[in-house]
Image (cartoon, grey):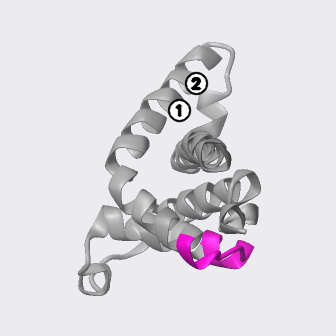
């Protein structure tokens, strides 16, 4: 019974982490135009629909790599908040740029540097939210 509860907790934490990552990605991407977006002419439903679509896309794209990292964390009982934040940021950048991130990033300047920062921040936010709900107790089901 304990393992079933743990699997459900991992799934719920993953969904909440995807929501947090999408929220940070949406706000970070739209931050330069925030004054226009926060005007009364733009309904907040539009912003939340962007977050919802982003959540679904992040959840599907990051499913396999994230569950690989989650399985390793559960198996080795990794519970460090720093580890989950760092792995979230690295995973977000790796999923976006692939394994040749260093070669791709060499030729980019200001506008794309902001994109990398927002992507890393969204991955870190997702990793931290996952840690809050499931990562703190990783591996305890084995005891």
Q: Which x, y percent locates residue 115?
A: 44, 61
Q: Which x, y percent locates residue 121?
A: 58, 63
The local secondary structure at tag 1 comes to: helix
Residues rendered magenta in the picture: 75-85
In the figure, is residue 116 to the left or right of 10?
left
Residue in the foreground of this view, choosing between 10 and 111:
10
| 39 to 65, vertically: above or below | above
Tag 1: Cα neighbours inside 10 Å, few (<14), some, or many (≥20)? many
Q: Which x, y percent locates residue 16?
A: 62, 41
The local secondary structure at tag 2 comes to: helix
**Residue, disc 2:** 48
Q: CA distance from mark 2 to mark 1?
A: 5 Å
- Tell me the chief SS of the magenta region: helix
Q: Quarter-wise, where is residue 99 in the image?
A: bottom left
Q: Is residue 96 magenta?
A: no
In this view of the protein, can residue 30 be seen by the observer? yes
Q: Quarter-wise, where is residue 80 in the image?
A: bottom right
**Mark 1 and mark 2 in contact (Cβ < 8 Å)?**
yes
Q: How many numbered discs sit on the rendered protein?
A: 2
Residue at 60% over, 29% down: 37
In this view of the protein, can residue 116 be seen by the observer? no
Residue at 65% over, 67% down: 142
Quadrant containing the N terminus in the rendered view: top right
Residue in the foreground of this view, choosing between 40 and 53:
53
Residue at 71% over, 73% down: 79
**Residue, disc 1:** 51
Tag 2: Cα neighbours inside 10 Å, few (<14), some, or many (≥20)? few
């Amino acid at each position: 019974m304990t393992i079933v509860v743990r699997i459900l907790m991992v799934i719920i934490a993953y969904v909440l982490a995807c929501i947090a990552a999408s929220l940070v990605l949406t706000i970070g991407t739209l931050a330069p135009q925030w004054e226009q977006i926060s005007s009364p002419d733009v309904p907040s439903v539009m912003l939340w629909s962007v977050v919802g679509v982003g959540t679904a896309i992040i959840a599907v794209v990051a499913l396999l790599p994230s569950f690989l990292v989650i399985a390793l964390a559960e198996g080795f009982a990794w519970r460090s908040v720093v580890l989950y934040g760092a792995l979230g940021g690295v995973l977000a950048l790796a999923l976006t740029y692939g394994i040749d991130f260093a070669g791709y990033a060499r030729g980019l300047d200001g506008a794309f540097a902001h994109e990398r920062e927002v992507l890393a921040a969204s991955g870190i936010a997702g990793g931290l939210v996952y840690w809050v709900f499931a990562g703190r107790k990783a591996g305890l089901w084995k005891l």
